[in-house]
Amino acid sequence: MTRPSDTTAVEVRGLVKHYGETRALDGVDLDVREGTVLGVLGPNGAGKTTLVRCLSTLVVPDAGTATVAGYDVVREPRALRRVIGLTGQYASVDEKLSGWENLYMIGRLLDLSRRDARRRADELLERFSLAEAAGRAVLTYSGGMRRRLDLAASMIGRPAVLYLDEPTTGLDPRSRNEVWDEITRLVADGATVLLTTQYMEEAERLAHELTVVDRGRVIAAGRVDELKAKVGGRTLQVRPVDPADLPAMARALADSGLDGIAGSTVVPEDGLLYVPILSDEQLTAVVGLLATRGFGITHIGTHLPSLDEVFLAITGEKSSPAAGATAGSSNDSSNDSSTGTSTVEEVTA
């Protein structure tokens, strides 16, 4: 497996793009390290697709600079197109051709020899579990099969940098997982990926780092854990031996004067006390105080905000720590397009 490099594969500075009065990109800066996945998150209309179109030479930016794999996207578009791949929001394969014919045609357009184009088409059809359907017209493919074929087509030329613009939109969970597995293999082989998505689970599973875009601007950037830490830190979950002790535990904390402890929330139906904390020192202080007051504790855990909560908080709709801690699992199952995965550390007494 290839380890992420410190070399920058994509470097963007002050990128601006107008569509009439609309400022789709408003001075975007970002960096993507070689051999990593950068997840670009943002609501509809945030500028994600415009960014991809600029970086793939489909649209010329109005201002700013962008270098991809050592090539300037404005001055060297022809050379750049030979080292990048793109999967857009909608599959762009020829429905009248077979899956194999689609891949072979793209290989030849990329100047592969007939022999290499055939071998590459066979190889990718096998990798994407499409070998049995290779000779069938794409018109007969399911949505997931077309999506996998489209992703395979973007990889024919073994791109150094691959742009994936919401690649799993509309896919069923099984097809989505297959696409995720293939992206993981690509990066393990050394490819660099810029991934735009609205799926929180997708970003958390695939991305090494995240950039959040809104109204054409970068409003947050960093690793998943760093962004979670910016949105209120962790929530300490305490389960007493006797649920009747919950109110008394909350009063003890409220009267304690512990530095940085803003308050706690009792959720009787969970049998838990939720305490927002910002550091390990605060965690130790809370647990120590409850122990010295004689409360028996059967469970202690910490909950990081889900990426869903982080996204809503950064874009202006912040959830409370207790609400996130108690509602996270139900939100995950009820809305597949906004799934968040919580990080939980547990100590059970």
Image (cartoon, rainbow, N blue to C red):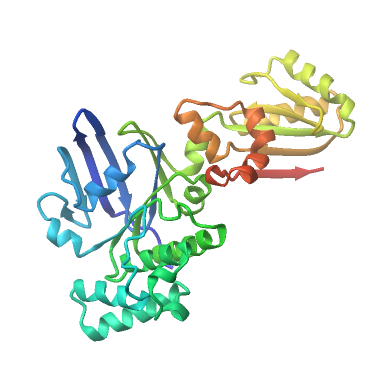
Image quadrant in which the N terminus is located: bottom left
Tally the numbered discs: 0
11 and 62: which is toward the camera: 62
Where in the figure is residue 319, as x and y percent of width and height?
Answer: 58, 27
Q: Residue furthest left?
A: 75
Instruction: Please tell me whether residue 247 is drawn above or below residue 226 in the rendered image.
Output: above
Q: Which quadrant of the structure image shows residue 90?
A: bottom left
Q: Which quadrant of the structure image shows residue 341?
A: top right
Image quadrant in which the C terminus is located: top right
Instruction: Please tell me whether residue 125 is drawn above or below residue 340 in the rendered image.
Output: below
Instruction: Please tell me whether residue 72 is drawn above or below residue 309 in the rendered image.
Output: below
276 and 269: which is toward the camera: 269
29 and 340: which is toward the camera: 340
Where in the figure is residue 170, as x and y percent of width and height?
Answer: 48, 53
Where in the figure is residue 233, as x and y percent of width and height?
Answer: 57, 32
Where in the figure is residue 248, as x and y percent of width and height?
Answer: 84, 19
The residue located at (56%, 44%) in the rendering is 339
The residue located at (25%, 48%) in the rendering is 53
Left of 301 or right of it: where is 124?
left
Whether residue 188 is visible, yes or no, is no
Left of 188 or right of it: where is 54?
left
Left of 269 or right of it: where is 139?
left
The residue located at (65%, 44%) in the rendering is 344
Whether residue 87 is visible, yes or no, is yes
Q: Which quadrant of the structure image shows residue 95?
A: bottom left
